[in-house]
Amino acid sequence: MANQYYNLHNIPFRSGTKEYTEAWRALNKDKQQQYQKDIKLTHNKLKREAMEYLGGKCSKCGYDKCTASLDFHHKDMETKDDGISNKINRRKVRTLEQLIPELDKCVLLCSNCHRELHNKDEWYYN
């Protein structure tokens, strides 16, 4: 079975077909799950490093209890290349050093401050 783990020559399907992909996933389920875990850990680590680079708390109110509640806000939308989270999640960047040029265009805001900033002109804003 260990040799079959990576060997798909016994599968009667052509590479690149739906059947081949399903058979590969069935044979390599553990490997796929570990790969997804590794990607998630890498993303979380890089996002945490990016937040620390920007101070680790909301730059407006100082909130720092839950990192999931912190957002990257671009100071000038004209200079925005791509969202920080998009760059991390789509694996466009692998290290903090690659992310720094985009982080320098941002501030860290909590969800509430970020929503208030973007909706200050709406009729329901007090």
Image (tube, rainbow, N blue to C red):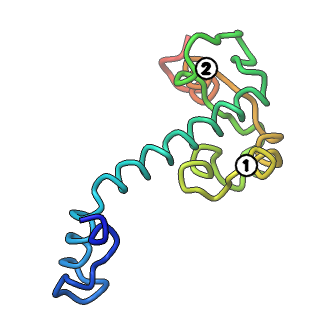
Residue 69 x, y percent position in the rendering: 54, 21
Q: Residue at x 35, y 49 (%)?
A: 33
For the C terminus, the image quarter is: top right
Front tag of 1 and 2: 1
Name which residue type carries label 2. Cys
39 or 102, nearer to the observer: 39
Above or below for 89 versus 74:
below
Looking at the image, residue 50 sits to the left or right of residue 89; the answer is right
57 or 46, nearer to the observer: 46
Q: Quadrant of residue 120?
A: top right
Above or below for 111 versus 7:
above
Above or below for 22 versus 85:
below
Residue contact between numbered discs 1 and 2, judged by CB atoms under 8 Å: no
Residue position for label 2: 110
Quick one: label 1 or label 2, which is nearer the N terminus?
1
70 or 14, nearer to the observer: 14
Q: Identify the mark at residue 95; answer none if there is no mark.
A: 1
Q: Report helix, strand or loop for mark 2.
A: strand
How far, Cα to Cα, is label 1 from label 2? 24 Å
- Local packing at callout 2 (Cα closer than 10 Å; few below 14, some 14-19, many 20+) is many
Looking at the image, residue 95 sits to the left or right of residue 12; the answer is right
Q: Report helix, strand or loop for mark 1.
A: loop
- Local packing at callout 1 (Cα closer than 10 Å; few below 14, some 14-19, many 20+) is some
Residue 45 x, y percent position in the rendering: 62, 36
Residue 20 x, y percent position in the rendering: 23, 78
Q: Residue at x 66, y 23 (%)?
A: 109
Q: Residue at x 20, y 83 (%)?
A: 10
Q: Residue at x 65, y 44 (%)?
A: 84
Name which residue type carries label 1. Thr
